[in-house]
Amino acid sequence: MEQYYDILLHCPLFDGITRQELGTMLACLDGNILEAAKGSPVFLEGEPARYVGVVLSGTVQVIRDDFYGNRSVLAAVPPGGIFGEAFACAGLETLPVSVVAPVPSTVLLLDCRRVLTGCSQACSFHIRLIRNLLQGIAQKNLMLTRKIRCMSPKTTREKLMTFLMDQAKQHAGAEFVIPFDRQALADYLGVERSAMSAELGKLRKAGLIECSGSRFRLLNPIAEP
């Protein structure tokens, strides 16, 4: 576990925790490490909403499939990011989403009940941990608001440009790497991949963007849709 301490110390859940405290905390929380192969699930929809996950390596995607099997990517979680906390804290019996690993990944799973409940030794870090957890949930709500803003425009072109300009703002520059491949980006925006690829081609041809894989560059100032 110690090889992941640097990642954990940069995780919002452990904000304000020292390296020495981290070892004691993890022993108290009795976390489990899960190795997820490429394309394999970490959680499946319908499983008990019990765990808070921390990505140690790789990445995971929070997804939802509708009745007809159409997939929507709700979030991509990088190393140091957390997932599952809102559902576990909400007291849901089962998960309304799935979490999958698009690349080989390692995650730390913490039982939410142990996070929220002080142990018999009255560890002083539990209050700090709970505060960090609540702050993390609030930040996820902001991320959901950002996703809704990107999906609100009517056309695929407008959705793409809203997303790309938002990414430029987050990275404080015109060049950035997005946390999605093409299919995941289409799922995130709620559009057809072929239509999205066609629009990307038009934007490149118009000299508005450059892109290669997940790397993008905005070439001209563009009014927000």
Image (cartoon, helix red, strand yellow):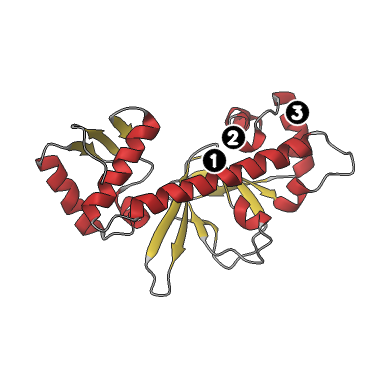
Disc 2 residue type? Answer: Cys
Residue furthest to the right: 120
Left or right: where does residue 175 sit relative to residue 78?
left
Name above or below for residue 47 compared with residue 217: below
Left or right: where does residue 164 sit relative to residue 47?
left
Q: Which residue is mark 3?
A: 21
Name the element at disc 2: loop
| Contact between labelled residues 2 and 1, with CB atoms less than 8 Å apart | yes
Q: Position of residue 31 (x, y in %)?
A: 70, 45
Left or right: where does residue 214 sit relative to residue 15?
left
Residue 177 in view, yes or no: no
Count neighbours of disc 3 (C-alpha within 10 A) and say few if under 14, some if 14 to 19, many if 20 or more: some
Disc 3 residue type? Answer: Glu
Disc sitting over residue 118 in the figure? none
Foreground pick, 50 / 31: 50
Q: Which residue is mark 2?
A: 11
Check the picture and name the quadrant holding the N terminus.
top right
Disc 1 residue type? Answer: Gly
Nearer-N-terminus badge (1/2): 2
Name the element at disc 1: loop
Count neighbours of disc 1 (C-alpha within 10 A) and say few if under 14, some if 14 to 19, many if 20 or more: many
Q: Which residue is mark 1?
A: 81
